[in-house]
Amino acid sequence: MATVLPPPSKRQKREEIERTQTQQDVAPLLATDLGSFKANFVDSDGNQMADVVEINFADATEKNVSALLNTLLGRDPEDFTPYRFRIHIPGKDTIIDQYPTDLLGLLQKHGVTNPFETTITLSAEPQAVFKVHAVSRLAHRIPGHGQPILTCQFSPISSSRLATGSGDNTARIWDTDSGTPKHTLKGHTGWVLGVSWSPDATRLATCSMDKTVRIWDPETGKPIGQAFNGHAKWVLGLAWEPYHLWRDGTPRLVSASKDGTCRIWIVNTGRTEHVLSGHKGSVSCVRWGGTGLIYTGSHDKSVRVWDAVKGTLVHNLTAHGHWVNHIALSSDHALRTAYFDHTRDIPETEEGKRAKAKERFEKAAKIQGKVAERLISASDDFTMYLWDPANNGTKPVARLLGHQNKVNHVQFSPDGTLIASAGWDNSTKLWNARDGKFLKSLRGHVAPVYQCSWSADSRLLVTGSKDCTLKVWNARTGNLAMDLPGHEDEVYAVDWAADGQMVGSGGKDKAVRTWRN
Amino acid sequence: MPQNEYIERHRKLHGRRLDHEERARKKAAREGHKQSENAQNLRGLRAKLYAKQRHAQKIQMRKQIKQHEERNVKGKPAEKEPSDPVPAYLLDRANPTSAKALSSQIKSKRAEKAARFSVPIPKVRGISEEELFKVVKTGKKMQKKGWKRVVTKPTFVGPDFTRRPVKYERFIRPMGLRYKKANVTHPTLNVTVQLPILSVKKNPSNPLYTQLGVLTKGTIIEVNVSDLGIVTASGKIAWGRYAQITNNPENDGCINAVLLV
């Protein structure tokens, strides 16, 4: 039989009653007062955003601080923008990119002995208000092409149309919602090396080994006009004129060729407006900037900047020691999608569309209140250079060292704060787009990484590699978010749709694959 | 007969002599003098052998110099249309595509069911035990009993093998007939690489021969292909692949094999 406890003594009873009747002191149970610090919020250009406020260390989680800043800026709770904070250590040049869980501990670790009386500068970077989920599964495997797929691009409107170019001399347009082929664009007599949607998605341009450029109607799959002849060798790349620069509805197109020239075509007539000649080697990559400049990277080690209207050379950027493989602009995403954004309201009128496209471009390219379109060039000499040709001339902003082999592909994040570079050293690296500082190395691939593509919210990155896999990375932590095996051979082309719904990829195994979450 | 890599082991444990570097440098520095002396003073058969060896060396040297010269030529390579479609960023690159092609071929081949179990040499000559084994008759006891055998064909012996005590050893695999590497050819690419053998998977004549690691024509061996950078579908580097021996190693003194795709 269990032992019966003796009844409580008188004293015990009295204490029990006393305990239930008086309010207990809860202070020691709560967190000990960690003290507070003064926070000075600055935006990415260094301008002060709000008055200096005092924040308790106990409450200083990134989410709380973000909500506080929104409140200080007088926003409605519905319009709150998520912010990411970078912490400037007072009295030092050190900037912490990642917001810690234990802020006090971090400050003490960096030698701030008495954080309670110092003002800590937090630079706030607004994050996309929408969130793209990491793609996690194979949505469709669509066979059709008879040869390896060399390039792919999603329509700027939505993820439901994907265009691919292949070694079987055709380009194809796919309906990715149903996973079916839509149109086969036959006409080229050589491999289709590049496909490019016009920023308003009414036209599709393809370039090929047969030295021609062709324009297609993506709705009907019919060619528009004749093939553009003129190049003496393979046409390697294309770039459309940004939508806000179009004059009375006549877009222009620039094509880069192995013969060392670029040609600006008037798309409606197929007439060559200018021939940009000067490169002594194959032009590997071309970009059309939003300020009316054309940027070309070439195998003759130089990057050249041209005036698109006059067709004259503006700058010749020579710093690389080997081929320039790829160049990217900080406004690439905004220019590619023109007036299509996450809100999905498309202006009615032509002027409205143009104004919106211009506004989006300027938002993407603005630094310190002025339009500064940054350019990054990746090269075979294992380095990259960050340029600001409009403001800085031929002087590079930064040299990005760190890759241990050739750098194949480089891409600005859509919000313009990060740069991702992929190379033959099996790694992808993240860099700060403002000053070119190295941030992270994304390791995981076991073969050269050929291409990478950002999600529209700049939080995720997908890379395609020779090792037959795609990998999705979290740009914030640098961790592998998702490993996507499934390709049977090298992945040559990968693209994340502008609306973030889908990733399309193609490669040597001849089947287009689409991935979604 | 050396048992295991005892010199390497000693080096790992105790390091090299302290003056090793210096000695190696001096030896290399004297090499020219040594050769000159030999060339002038050797007589007879040794002179003959030396001359032959030196002749071969010089041929090799000239070839290498020629290769370097070819590499330094600044001229344009012939403009040739590449055969396999590759994206724009891989054009103009001299790609080491060979290794990669291996894996894709393996995959496409596996898709055809009939080809799954076929090998390049489907029929092999059976090898009898009389041919493979020689009875050991040396020694007083052995003459009476005669249960000890010497394998007369080339064998592969794993790196961790230690001989059993002589009293219990039934099969002797002679050192001179052991092989560690095979010249493996890819059938369609016609590239041949020397690869380390990992194991003997199947000797079609007899399961006992598989156990003993006997290398005869038609034997399936596993080779280490990690240098080639072949990747599996899940994005890992492939390590071992099977190959079939195509020559008679006992006649040729080397092992030629063809990769199974």
Image: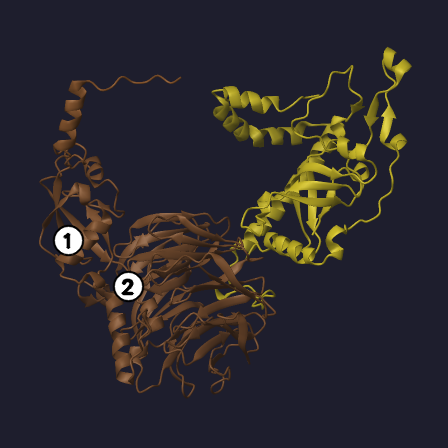
Q: Quadrant of residue B27?
A: top right
Whether labels 1 and 2 belong to a single chain: the reply is yes
The answer for which chain carries disc 1 is A
The answer for which chain carries disc 2 is A
- Residue A234 at x, y = what percent? 50, 73
Whether residue B69 is visible, yes or no, is: yes
- Residue A331 at x, y = what percent? 30, 67
- Residue A285 at x, y = what percent? 41, 67
Mark before the other along the chain sequence, 1 or 2: 1
Q: Label 1: how many residues lie within 10 Å, few (<14), some (14-19) or many (20+)? A: many
Q: Colour of chain B?
A: yellow
Q: Could you say which is closer to the camera, residue A345 or residue B65?
A: A345
Location of mark 2 (residue): A374
Location of mark 1 (residue): A41
- Chain letter, colour brown in render: A
Q: Residue at x 40, y 17 (%)?
A: A1
Q: Amino acid at mark 2?
A: Arg
Q: Judge whether A247 appears above or below B207 on screen.
A: below
